[in-house]
Amino acid sequence: MAIDGILNCGHRRGERFHHRVVKMNFKELCPARLVVASNRSPYTFRQIGRSMKAERAIGGLVAAVEPALCFLGGIWIGWSGRPQHQPERMAVPPDDPKYELQFVALSNDEINRYYEGFANGALWPLCHYALDKCDFSREHWQVYAAVNQKFAAAILQELRPQDVVWIHDYHLALVPQFVRTGAPGVRIAYFWHIPFPSVDLFRALPWRRDVLRGLLNSDLIGFHTETYVRNFLDCAETILNVPVDRERGLVTLGNRAVKVRALPLGIDVAYCQQLASSPEMQAKAETIRRALKSEIVALGVERLDYTKGILERMWAVERLLEKYPDLRHRFSLLQIAAPSRTKVSEYRRLKRLVDETIGRINGRFAQLDWAPITYFYKAIPRAELTAYYQAADMALVIPLRDGMNLVAKEYVASRTNDEGIIILSEFAGVAEEFEQEAILVNPFDIEQVAEAIKQAIDMEPSERRQRMHRLREKVKRHDLTWWLRRILREIASLSESRVVVESNVMRHRAP
């Protein structure tokens, strides 16, 4: 039976538009049950008095994967986000259960070494081309491998015949191999959500062969861009010396052919447009514009992370105001930076530098009734961000490196009047899709970024509207439903010879 309708999948009550419109027949695309694994569970836990309250996490991964689980059924395995915390298995959403959660408990030491140490202290900077920030600790690597084994054991415990395992992101790169060892016939899909670096950079990782072999025990590996696919194929061919078919996107490991695909993640455009059309958001956007007291408003939104180009954005604004004094009092930047990894010294140092830089620039150029930079160091709810997207004449999306960057797509989807323009880093994954319509810049070239802002300001309104209209058509065409349809078709097409035999599964269930 076809499923066609509106799914309210676990969003918090009272959030007026927090629903996801999904019009596709999931069961025809992929009739299998899903076993999803990611570092973090899609539900987080907050201490309230003596009890814990489960809340649905807000993020691109949850928004992308949860609709498929809600319709196909299955289980999501992840860490609760709290040390030594393993909640009981639970069905979610609580008011209308569609799938189950199972939790992997992590100790403080495992969090420090697996998560902070190796995943975010080695793989994250390596994949974002920040080799100087990499900490290649053998102890961290060993704990990373042990935690990946723990996740694999949890997956094997849950497997049923004909299940498909869908693993997400760099935290769990070894899990496919550990699962394959326990259940040789299982179908495994893997999605790598961050950039995959060039072979010259990746070979700096002491455990490069282990990570590649871990990933290549999947049947399907997805990346956001063709560039990341090429980089991965180069690494497999150069480092492992295995056969690579670039035309068909296949890597042969032993007697298995692994599909490697570019599957750029889309957003829920209908949700963004509904938010943008609400009188509440439009009124809030007007309030923001009045408060900033600027004719031209630029917007930056991201986590506070050294990969996001926040300092470079500030320096570009400073250069713009130096070079074009007539823009003082006319132009301002609204910078929103959500706190991130606040216990890590590198991130604390970055926050201090951002605070100091903004203070210095505002101190230099501000007037009684105007400041060049307005800065919010806090997370703003997704729905509320729509008002900021609508208030801004341009989005400055200039990460030093980024796997995709959904902020760029959300900004476009929120511009229902075809106004606005994006200044975009050529090193963001989304640049492969937006290269003709956005103003592309090298974020390391501060002069170029400043000139790009001036170009956007001086651009004829008709050209801005044409560019934005084309971007909106792209984002609508390649939305979240399109991504789910593509990836589920790829998963469904995996060889039936990979299907788990029941006796093989049962051997790995706990007595």
Image (tube, rainbow, N blue to C red):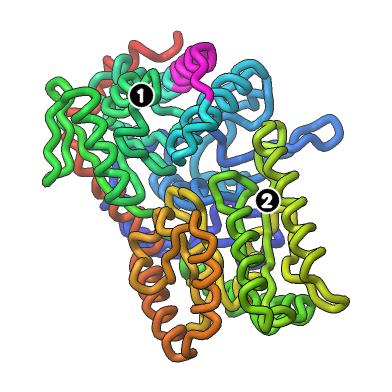
Percent x, y of residue 436: 34, 72
x and y percentages locating residue 251 in the rendered image: 17, 33
19 up-or-down from 110: above or below: below
Pointer 1 residue: 211
Could you tell me how far apart the alpha carbons at marks 2 and 1 are, in whole angstroms? 30 Å
Q: Earlier in the sequence, mark 2 or mark 1?
A: 1
Q: Residue at x 39, y 71 (%)?
A: 476
- Please state if 427 lies on the left or on the right of 317 as rendered: left
Question: Is 139 within the magenta?
Answer: yes
What residue type is disc 2 on?
Ala
What residue sits 40% from the left and 43% below the top? 195
Q: Is residue 413 left or right of residue 16?
A: left
**Dot 2 and dot 1 residues touching (CB under 8 Å):** no
Residue located beneath label 2 in the image = 338
Q: Nearer the viewer, residue 26 or 135?
A: 135
- Label ID, residue 335: none
In which quadrant of the rendered view does residue 194 lie?
A: top left
Amino acid at pointer 1: Val
Q: Main secondary structure of the magenta part?
A: helix
Q: Is residue 257 magenta?
A: no
How many C-alpha atoms fall within 10 Å of the one at disc 2: few (<14), some, or many (≥20)?
some
From the viewer's side, name the closer residue of 164 and 384.
Answer: 384
Residue 126 at what x, y percent from top left?
A: 45, 33
Q: Secondary structure at mark 1?
A: helix
